[in-house]
Image: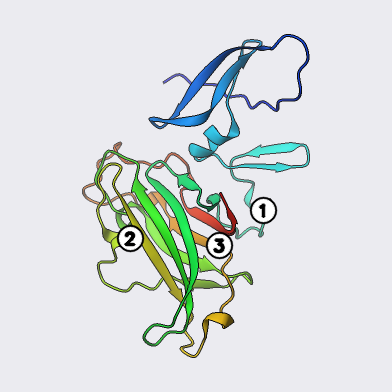
Amino acid sequence: MPRLRLHLLALAALSGAALAATNYSIIVNGQVTQGQAIVVNGQTYVPLSALKRLGVQTSVNGSTLTLGAPAPATAPGGANQRASLEGCVGETLFNGIWRLTTRKVEPIGPDVGLGSGWGVTVELRNGTATRTSLHDTGLTAIELVQPDGNTLVFEERTAEEPFLYKELTQAGGVTYQLRFHVQDSRATASSVPRPAKLVVQLDPKRLTAGYLIAGKVAYTTPTPSFRVRLDCQK
């Protein structure tokens, strides 16, 4: 497949004749997306939103636009910061296999032997043509990060947790409330601060389950993990 050069365009107010001679609709991974690609002076430009759907991280600092994950030593949070696809509540993130959308964040009461905590309702959809589950595509951890940086680990309620183990067909999905509790059974809802981020850790090196066919299932980004900011809404 020929390599395409994608240029990013910052548009300012233009006077006189329009420079864009051609517009293109954009299809990302088989789905039509919002926005258009345009041709200006023989160069083709696509919006950042299209690159984001491909899993390309973007950030703006002053007059500098950065594509992809920053260097580990300078990444926010220090050298131990984990690279992930990042978004907000209501925003769909896609890593080449899974589409994840966080729908709701709400306080939950105590459970047996555990204190109060938070429930995060998420929608997970299979973006491949192969039947598979989250567990068999490199899942290593699901964490809820508190404002102070401490984490609450997802509490599995059954040995066959649907979010983890349910095999989803092409475009199939599951909507599920992930429940996170503090270990102190005396903790009340008011004593557990609202979480800052949901992190779903995925390791592409673990795509080795027996029924996954080589070349049929693959992440389109080297950092397929999801990091959802729970303090913003899209």
Kindly identify the residue that appears in the image at 76 percent across and 23 percent down: 13
**Badge 2: residue crowd in 10 Å (few <14, some 14–19, many ≥20):** many
Residue that numbered label 1 is attached to: 73
- Report the colour scheme: rainbow
Residue that numbered label 3 is attached to: 197
Residue 178 place in picture, x, y as percent: 40, 66
For marks 1 and 2, the one nearer the N-term is 1
Kindly identify the residue that appears in the image at 49 percent across and 87 percent down: 184
Q: Which mark is residue 60?
A: none
For marks 2 and 3, the one nearer the N-term is 2
Element assignment for label 1: helix
Among the 4 quarters of the image, the one containing residue 22: top right
| Type of amino acid under label 1 | Ala
Residue 89 place in picture, x, y as percent: 52, 55
Among the 4 quarters of the image, the one containing residue 191: bottom right
**Position of residue 192 in the picture relative to residue 99 (left or right):** right
| Type of amino acid under label 2 | Phe
Residue that numbered label 2 is attached to: 163
For marks 1 and 3, the one nearer the N-term is 1
Element assignment for label 2: helix
Q: Are marks 1 and 2 in contact (CB under 8 Å)?
A: no
